[in-house]
Image (cartoon, rainbow, N blue to C red):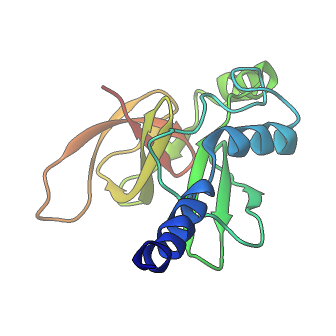
Amino acid sequence: MLHYRFAIPIMSLFAMGAASPFEDSAALDRQVAAHLGAQIGDAGGARAPIDTKLRLKRCSNGVRFSDTKNNAVMVSCPELGWRIFVPVRRSQAGLSNQSERADEFVVFRNQPLTLVVKRPSFSISYGVVAQKNGRIGDYIPVRANRKSKELMARVSGSGEVELVQ
């Protein structure tokens, strides 16, 4: 008789373990590819797959996709409050427009900027202030505030610099 009292809770634990409480990164990759209309690594597609180590809680109403100005797609779940940015590989047409503007300053001294640290499977953004004027491709000093250490970052666009390592 005692066996039955413990059998039902144990069986319910096994049943709960069958469905993962986290989003499947491979399914998110497929959804991003469908949203962008290009596969991972192709021009116009994601640069790399979403990191499988991310443990994003499963979104009950489905995830949302929105394009950003910074060559990324934001994948978010508003009801749970999480969001990730998936870097997008630029097409060759976008690169030629940048080379035409190479002689113009796109970053000015004391301008607030977004510092982006890019890795194959994720990117991190942080607010900094430019210490000098810069053109696309120039390395300029930036800092988060007056007391912080100066970092050298490469100008990657208007209002954006990237930390290159």
Residue 64: where, in percent of width, then height? Answer: 76, 63
Which one is nearer the viewer's eye here, 69 or 141? 69
Which one is nearer the viewer's eye here, 31 or 93? 31
- In the image, residue 68 above or below residue 157: below
Residue 32: where, in percent of width, then height? Answer: 76, 43
Q: Is residue 138 left or right of residue 86?
A: left
Disc tally is: 0
Q: Is residue 149 left or right of residue 134?
A: left
Query: At 34% from the left edge and 37% from the top edge, which residue is drawn?
Result: 153
Which one is nearer the viewer's eye here, 61 or 43? 61
Which one is nearer the viewer's eye here, 12 or 72? 12
Residue 89: where, in percent of width, then height? Answer: 68, 28
Quarter of the image where one finds residue 77: bottom right
Q: Is residue 34 left or right of residue 150?
A: right
Query: At 47% from the left edge and 48% from the top edge, which residue is drawn?
Result: 54
- In the image, residue 152 above or below residue 1: above
Query: At 55% from the left edge and 65% from the top edge, which residue is drawn?
Result: 11
Q: For the C terminus, which image quadrant?
A: top left
Residue 101: where, in percent of width, then height? Answer: 66, 31
Quarter of the image where one finds residue 102: top right
